Image (tube, rainbow, N blue to C red):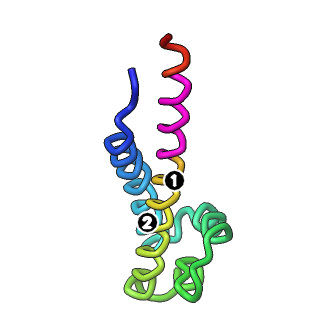
């Protein structure tokens, strides 16, 4: 059975982005998970919009960083899910015959 690429990508982006968004907001509010967010921000450039740099400030100063990091999470999930779906469909087509 082949994967519907668009549906698989939409489901993957949703299930990957929502937990990322929750972690980013939780880190901004309580400081929990700062090492995970620091690792994520070390891979993805966020300019001056870093959550870690603004975690001691008010929550509103972290909102641009939350948005940027959530978009990075969505783009990463989209790229990985489309690659996975394409390879899956390629290999399942060869093994079905």
Tell me where residue 88 appears, x and y as whole percent: 51, 30
User: Could you classify mark 1 by the number of other residues whose Cα lies within 10 Å: few (under 14), some (14-19), or many (20 or more)?
Assistant: few
Q: Earlier in the sequence, mark 1 or mark 2?
A: 2
Q: State the residue position of label 2.
A: 26
Between 7 and 61, the one nearer to me in the picture: 7
Which of the image's four quarters has the N terminus? top left
Residue 38: quadrant of the picture: bottom right
Q: CA distance from mark 1 to mark 2?
A: 25 Å
Q: Is residue 24 above or below residue 14?
A: below
Q: Secondary structure at mark 2?
A: helix
Residue 74: quadrant of the picture: bottom left
Q: Does residue 91 show up magenta in the picture?
A: yes
Q: Is residue 92 above or below residue 24?
A: above
Taking the spot 37% from the left edge, 55% from the top edge, the residue there is 18
Magenta span dominant secondary structure: helix
Tell me where residue 3 appears, x and y as whole percent: 39, 31
Q: Which mark is residue 94?
A: none
Taking the spot 32% from the left edge, 42% from the top edge, the residue there is 7
Q: Is residue 3 above or below residue 36?
A: above
Q: State the residue position of label 1.
A: 79
Q: Does residue 79 show up magenta in the picture?
A: no
- Magenta segment range? 81-92
Taking the spot 52% from the left edge, 84% from the top edge, the residue there is 49
Tell me where residue 97 appears, x and y as whole percent: 50, 10
Side of 97 where 35 appears, left or right? right
């Amino acid at each position: 059975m082949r994967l519907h690429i668009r549906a698989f990508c939409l489901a993957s982006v949703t299930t990957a982005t929502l937990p990322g968004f929750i972690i980013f907001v939780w880190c901004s509010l309580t400081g929990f998970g700062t090492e995970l967010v620091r690792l994520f921000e070390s891979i993805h450039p966020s300019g001056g919009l870093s959550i870690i740099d603004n975690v001691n400030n008010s929550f509103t100063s972290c909102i641009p960083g939350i948005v940027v990091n959530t978009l990075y999470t969505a783009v990463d999930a989209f790229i990985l899910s489309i690659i996975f779906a394409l390879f899956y469909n390629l290999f399942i087509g060869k093994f079905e015959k």
